[in-house]
């Protein structure tokens, strides 16, 4: 199953801290030997300031109480640096912690800067120090503090590059604190900046988009409205292009989102096109399932893939999120996915058949005969399906639904008159100005 | 004979007397007043003389019909005589020039090496007179200034001139007239006097000593006189030896100045009339050995290489191969020097200072030497290419020539390394492109062969390749032993063997990434095309396709130079073949159909000249076209290409025709194929297939009836398939495709005759697996090509038979046309009101071009235009692709390849306009299939989405 593990492909696009949840998940699922994961964690932590945590892991990894000297040294160093940064940022932090003073800030940035300078002797250096302090807090794992400071910093910062980094930091902090609503806001803000900003090179911009998409996975698969969000975001031309150029593995998440989201069926065609184009560079059971079903119409193959999909979903850190109930734990996404995928198969199957044996259908749907019959009857009753069950022979008979020729022609020509009318109207309307310009 | 005649018949002695008399007379004091009298007198005398001359001439004409030339010459001689009589050196000088010119003509006419005796005699006469005049110092003083000047220059000229004919003159003096002997001694003395006052000597017949003294004189002359320059030429053209000796005389005396001066002289003579190109090379080569400083040697080597380039003056011919090889060696030496002395900088932007190259090997600062290595390399490559163009590919010579490729590769690699070392990556990229263009068309096998060859070469260099070089260099070596050893010895520092990585792809990747990073626009585009080509050869279709689409090359290619366009066509052709091999029929057809649309494949691929029935090419055009032909070994096999194209067209078109029987024109996938089919259907008798076309047509006939076996057999019997790599797999794939299409065609054609059809029967009929058949039929049902549905319990296809009547069909067509009309009206309106349809005008223009092409009326440089129109259509399929609006994101392709291309702001819009099928030009109407798919952005020849919907 490890072959479908995308962690190694996703991780390079994430912040160091964001990789932790993924590693936690892997540890939980026991794909890899524990000590490998622990080592990876230490490796990760080595560049951050979470030295205590690294020490803990080290202890559990080697089952010792000893800690390597460099970690101890590093700890001292980190603490010292924290102190110094705290000091340099102190004036501004002090100011910001006083609510009455904060009240005096106005939306006008220039005014604020001027005021801070005049009244509190807080200049650019202090503001810069605030940023460094916030970053350091983040590195230490104090995400809430970092998020707060970064928020304040953004209000005062004039450097747009810095502001962008601050935004990234804020987003990471919010994600790590699992404040999905706030994170989503930040995400949208960031997206706006990325799309509007003139990057030095398109490459840079692309890279930013790809990061954004990766980070957004955390949000979209946890936020309640995330499933619409992911489709909205990922199907934008620019982002779809980014996926196709450099992040093919994201197709898994797009595909899952489309399958799960009943209201976004219309995206399916486009998705399949993309999957087809990229099949040489990326494929996993989920995309193959769609391919089987909509390109090859191979229902048995689709069935097989569906079983693999289940594994993939369970083992994916984003998709396989478990909901713990007191009695049992489920993976809600998996259930939804299977349900919808089944519906897909069934629908397509019905479209090309006029008569289906319910027994076969039950088999195809992974259901028992009675269950299948009940399921079908429900569908028929909900008028999603124009069909009748012939219970004597145990078949489902589809009603042929061919549009009458005349209806078709009427349908085709109906909008023509409207369009022509509009055209004529437009011509008349624009005639005077056009005539003027001609003169 | 003639000399006899002239010698006797002439009044030489008389003249002598007369002259002396006359000369005395004038000297005696013919005043200004009598000058005219003297002139008349002279004229009188002349007529006397010329009387006899004339009669001589007439006799000669009658007798031997020698030539007018001799007459002319003798007339000039007479003039000279007259001038001598009046001591008029100015006119004498003119006559002397004239006679020299005439001499050339005479020699040309008589086709003999020797100068005619008449001329020699005139020379002797002049010499004598000159000696006399110089001896007579008083008279000299009395001369007018212009006359004296003329006398002096005459002295110089004559001396130089006579050296050429020394032997003959001496012979003449000795032999023909005994009475002249006495004279002969005198002038020779006199000559000695001229040469060097006070140096009395030796036997005048000894050339060595003469030349020695002459050269001494020259050395002085050089300093004093501007005209002296000519002397070197003469002497050297006479024999290189002379110069050799001169330098050999005392190597220590040779200074930087002498060498530099000489170099300048030789270079100045370049391109002048009468300068032997080969000789110049030899002279310069000699100079390289006596060069004083490395920088100077470098300078001279550059001149040598340029001179070698000059050896072949014509634009269409190629440089002689041995010269080419020597040139390579010289270039390598240049690189050796540059390697050895990193402080020497080659530059062509600044004119270096006068004495820059004087700085010796121990000079530490940078030395600038004028030169352009990139240009040299490019020229070498061009010459190599040209030689391959010219040599008949079926001869051994061609193969031999191909073996020289590693030599060039060595050079190019070394130059590239050099540029990389000095940090001139732009130039390095240019050189890398040359290498890329040598490698890109080679499949792995050929590449391996080349690698082996070069390795063998280097093992056997000493006896093998150097063997022939040795032969050439033998004389040099000898001379070198004899002459002074090279002052600047250059050890072989740069590697003399090319380095080839195991895999051609590795090499390509290395070079190409360098180019993408540093190359200019054209270099990058070309490298990209080569890259695409190479990927296609290696069956990496998707990579090649992505490169092509992301680079936006299709949009801009019609603005590029023709050779790049040809490269583009080659890449497209190869891409098509590649798509076919990996069984992507639609894509293959998309790539190839454009090439075949105009019926000028040969021309488009530059693999031969196709005749145009309606239009004769001018010779210039033909020449141009011939110059851009691909050498034979780079050809894409046209027969294979045609087979692939037609097979693809057949696979796509047969079912399509079956589906649209009502109006054949409705949806045409391949116009070419349709036309061919029509032609073959018109034939009264269809014989057994002979060429590719016949085969495919025969297969088509079988396929229309659903007879897959016969269709496949016919196709399989084509010979060209053996050119395919993994032929068996491809044929297997072809078979299954043919089966599929047969099944589809059968169902579409006979659907109305069935009420239901069991799948087992279908599988039996088409020898196809049940799952496969099920998949195909299901697909047809979903896309509503086939109005039927499965009856699962009985495993049958139940046909609905909702066949429309003819009237209903027509009604459908009408509605479709109506909606097209409305759409185009809307577009027209938008275009009028400026709806941002920038793409419209160019599209329209292209469309017209195309129309012109179709009727064969256009006259201009059709190659580029024709292609332009072709691409007009082709951009259609960029549009369908996913990259159309992504001006921004493209740039980010991981390898940084597209950086520059992605950001063309207008690109997106332009394509958008296309994508929405703006401007229904005649072209589009012609193939409405394309425009339709265009409009729905669904066609995508290069994207596989074709049948998803």
Image (cartoon, helix red, strand yellow):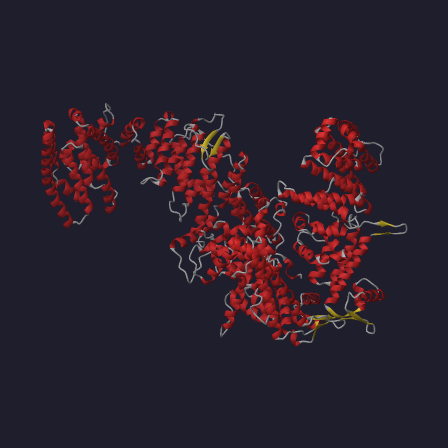
- Give the camera-side residue of B35 and B120: B35
Residue B734 position, x and y percent, is 61, 63
Residue B373 position, x and y percent, is 47, 38
Residue B279 position, x and y percent, is 35, 39
- In the image, residue A288 above or below residue A120: below
**Res B899 quadrant in image:** top right
Q: Residue at x 49, y 43 (%)?
A: B408
Locate the C terminus of chain B by quadrant: bottom right
Residue B68 position, x and y percent, is 19, 47
- In the image, residue B635 above or below residue A144: below
- In the image, residue A417 above or below residue B146: below
Locate the N terminus of chain B by quadrant: top left
* Residue A291 visible in the displayed image: yes
- Give the camera-side residue of A125 and B929: A125
Outermost residue toward the right in this view: A327
Left/right placement of residue B278 relative to residue B734 reads: left
Q: Residue at x 15, y 42 (%)?
A: B6
- Give the camera-side residue of A171 and A2: A171
* Residue B842 visible in the displayed image: no
Query: What number of labels is visible?
Result: 0
Outermost residue toward the top in this view: B198
Left/right placement of residue A408 relative to residue B122 reads: right
């Amino acid at each position: 199953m490890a072959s479908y593990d995308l962690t190694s492909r996703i991780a390079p696009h994430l912040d160091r801290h964001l990789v932790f949840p993924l590693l936690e998940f892997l540890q939980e699922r026991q794909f890899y030997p524990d000590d490998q994961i622990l080592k990876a964690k230490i490796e990760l932590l080595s560049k951050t300031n979470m030295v205590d945590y690294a020490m803990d892991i080290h202890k559990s990894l080697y089952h010792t109480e000893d800690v390597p000297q460099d970690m101890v040294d590093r700890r001292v160093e980190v603490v010292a640096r924290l102190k110094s940064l705290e000091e340099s940022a102190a004036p501004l932090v002090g100011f910001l912690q006083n609510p009455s003073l904060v009240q005096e800030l106005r939306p006008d940035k220039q005014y604020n800067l001027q005021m801070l300078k005049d009244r509190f002797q807080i200049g650019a250096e202090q503001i810069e120090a605030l940023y460094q302090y916030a970053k350091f807090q983040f590195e230490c794992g104090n995400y809430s503090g970092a998020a707060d400071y970064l928020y304040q910093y953004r209000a005062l910062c004039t450097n747009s590059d810095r502001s962008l980094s601050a935004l990234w930091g804020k987003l990471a902090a919010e994600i790590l604190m699992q404040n999905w609503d706030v994170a989503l806001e930040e995400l949208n803000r960031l997206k706006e900046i990325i799309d509007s900003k003139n990057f030095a090179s398109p490459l840079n911009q692309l890279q930013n988009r790809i990061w954004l998409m990766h980070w957004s996975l955390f949000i979209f698969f946890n936020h309640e409205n995330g499933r619409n969000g992911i489709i909205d975001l990922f199907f934008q031309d620019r982002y779809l292009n980014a996926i196709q150029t450099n992040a093919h593995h994201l197709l898994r998440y797009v595909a899952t989102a489309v399958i799960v989201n009943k209201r976004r069926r219309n995206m399916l065609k486009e998705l399949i096109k993309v999957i087809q184009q990229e099949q040489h560079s990326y494929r996993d059971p989920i995309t193959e399932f769609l391919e089987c079903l909509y390109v090859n119409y191979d229902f048995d193959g689709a069935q097989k893939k569906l079983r693999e999909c289940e594994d993939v979903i369970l083992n994916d850190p984003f998709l396989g999120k478990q909901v713990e109930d007191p009695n049992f734990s489920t993976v809600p996404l998996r259930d939804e996915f299977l349900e919808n995928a089944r519906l897909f198969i069934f629908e397509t199957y019905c479209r090309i058949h006029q008569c289906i044996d319910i027994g076969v259908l039950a088999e195809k749907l992974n259901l028992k005969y009675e269950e299948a019959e009940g399921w079908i009857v429900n569908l028929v009753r909900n008028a999603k399906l124009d069909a009748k069950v012939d219970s004597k022979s145990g078949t489902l008979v589809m009603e042929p639904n061919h549009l009458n020729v005349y209806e078709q022609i009427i349908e085709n020509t109906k909008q023509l008159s409207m369009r022509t009318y509009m055209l004529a109207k437009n011509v008349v309307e624009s005639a005077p100005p056009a005539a003027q310009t001609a003169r | 004979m003639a000399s006899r005649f002239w010698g006797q018949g002439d009044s030489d002695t008389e003249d002598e007397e007369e002259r002396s008399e006359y000369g005395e007379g004038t000297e005696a004091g013919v005043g200004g007043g009598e000058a005219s009298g003297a002139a008349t007198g002279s004229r009188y005398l002349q007529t006397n003389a010329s009387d006899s001359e004339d009669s001589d001439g007439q006799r000669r004409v009658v007798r031997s019909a020698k030539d007018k030339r001799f007459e002319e010459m003798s007339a000039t001689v007479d003039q000279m005589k007259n001038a001598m009589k009046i001591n008029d050196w100015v006119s004498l000088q003119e006559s002397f020039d004239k006679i020299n010119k005439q001499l050339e003509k005479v020699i040309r006419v008589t086709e003999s090496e020797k100068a005619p005796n008449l001329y020699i005699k005139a020379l002797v006469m002049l010499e004598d007179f000159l000696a006399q005049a110089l001896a007579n110092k008083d008279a000299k003083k009395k001369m007018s200034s212009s006359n004296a000047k003329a006398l002096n220059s005459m002295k110089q000229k004559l001396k130089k001139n006579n050296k050429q004919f020394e032997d003959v003159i001496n012979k003449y003096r000795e032999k023909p007239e005994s009475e002249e002997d006495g004279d002969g001694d005198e002038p020779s003395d006199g000559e000695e006097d001229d040469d060097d006052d006070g140096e009395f000597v030796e036997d005048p017949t000894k050339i060595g000593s003469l030349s020695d003294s002459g050269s001494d004189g020259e050395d002085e002359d050089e300093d004093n006189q501007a005209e002296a320059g000519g002397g070197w030429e003469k002497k050297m053209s006479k024999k290189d030896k002379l110069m050799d000796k001169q330098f050999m005389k005392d190597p220590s005396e040779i200074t930087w100045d002498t060498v530099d001066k000489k170099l300048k002289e030789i270079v100045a003579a370049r391109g002048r009339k009468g300068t032997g190109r080969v000789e110049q090379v030899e002279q310069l080569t000699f100079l390289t050995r006596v060069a004083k400083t490395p920088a100077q040697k470098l300078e001279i080597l550059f001149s040598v290489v340029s001179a070698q380039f000059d050896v072949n003056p014509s634009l269409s011919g190629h440089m002689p191969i041995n010269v080419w090889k020597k040139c390579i060696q010289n270039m390598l030496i240049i690189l050796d020097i540059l390697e050895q002395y990193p402080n020497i900088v080659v530059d062509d932007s600044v004119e270096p200072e006068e004495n820059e190259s004087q700085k010796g090997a121990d000079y530490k600062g940078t030395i600038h030497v004028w030169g352009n290595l990139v240009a040299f390399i490019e020229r070498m490559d061009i010459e190599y290419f040209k030689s391959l163009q010219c040599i008949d590919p079926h001869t051994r010579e061609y193969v031999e020539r191909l073996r020289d490729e590693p030599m060039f590769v060595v050079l190019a690699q070394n130059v590239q390394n050099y540029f990389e070392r000095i940090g001139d990556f732009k130039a390095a990229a240019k050189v890398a492109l040359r290498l890329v263009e040598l490698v890109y068309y080679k499949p792995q096998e050929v590449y391996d062969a080349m690698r082996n060859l070069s390795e063998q070469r280097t093992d056997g260099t000493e006896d093998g390749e150097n063997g022939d070089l040795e032969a050439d260099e033998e004389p040099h070596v000898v001379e070198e032993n004899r002459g002074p050893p090279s002052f600047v010895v250059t050890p072989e520092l740069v590697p003399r063997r090319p380095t080839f990585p195991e895999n051609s792809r590795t090499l390509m990747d290395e070079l190409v990434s360098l180019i993408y990073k540093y190359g200019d626009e054209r270099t990058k585009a070309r490298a990209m095309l080569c890259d695409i080509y190479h990927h296609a050869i290696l069956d990496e279709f998707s990579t090649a396709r992505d490169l092509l689409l992301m680079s936006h090359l299709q949009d801009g290619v019609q603005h590029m130079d023709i050779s790049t366009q040809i490269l583009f066509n080659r890449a497209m052709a190869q891409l098509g073949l590649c798509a076919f091999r990996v069984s992507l029929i639609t894509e293959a057809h998309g790539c190839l159909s454009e090439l075949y649309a105009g019926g000028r494949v040969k021309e488009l691929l530059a693999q031969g000249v196709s005749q145009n029935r309606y239009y004769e090419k001018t010779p210039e055009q033909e020449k141009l076209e011939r110059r851009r032909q691909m050498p034979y070994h780079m050809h894409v096999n046209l027969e294979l290409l045609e087979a692939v194209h037609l097979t693809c067209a057949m696979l796509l078109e047969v079912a399509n025709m079956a589906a649209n029987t009502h109006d054949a024109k409705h949806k045409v996938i391949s116009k070419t194929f349709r036309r061919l089919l029509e032609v073959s259907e018109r034939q009264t008798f269809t014989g057994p297939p002979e060429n590719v076309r016949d085969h495919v047509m025969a297969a088509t006939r079988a396929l229309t009836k659903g007879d897959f076996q016969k269709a496949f057999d016919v196709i399989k019997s084509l010979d060209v398939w053996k050119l395919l790599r993994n032929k068996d797999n491809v044929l297997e794939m072809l078979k299954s495709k043919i089966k599929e299409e047969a099944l589809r065609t059968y169902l579409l054609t006979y659907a109305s005759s069935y009420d239901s059809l069991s799948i087992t029967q279908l599988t039996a009929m088409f020898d196809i697996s049940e799952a496969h058949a099920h998949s195909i039929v299901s697909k047809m049902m979903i896309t509503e090509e086939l109005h039927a549905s499965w009856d699962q319990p009985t495993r049958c296809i139940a046909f609905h038979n909702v066949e429309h009547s003819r009237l209903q069909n027509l009604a459908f067509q009408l509605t479709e046309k109506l909606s097209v009309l409305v759409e185009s009206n809307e577009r027209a309106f938008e275009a009028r009101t400026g709806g941002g349809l920038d793409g419209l005008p160019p599209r329209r223009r292209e469309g017209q071009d195309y129309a012109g092409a179709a009727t064969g009326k256009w006259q201009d440089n059709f190659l580029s235009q024709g292609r332009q129109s072709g691409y007009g259509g082709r951009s259609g399929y960029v549009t369908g692709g996913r990259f159309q609006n992504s001006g921004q994101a493209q740039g980010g392709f991981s390898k940084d390849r597209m950086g520059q291309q992605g950001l063309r702001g207008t690109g997106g819009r332009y394509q958008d306009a296309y994508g929405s099928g703006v401007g229904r030009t005649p072209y589009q109407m012609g193939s409405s299939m394309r425009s339709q798919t265009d409009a729905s952005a669904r066609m995508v020849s290069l994207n596989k989405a074709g049948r998803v919907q």
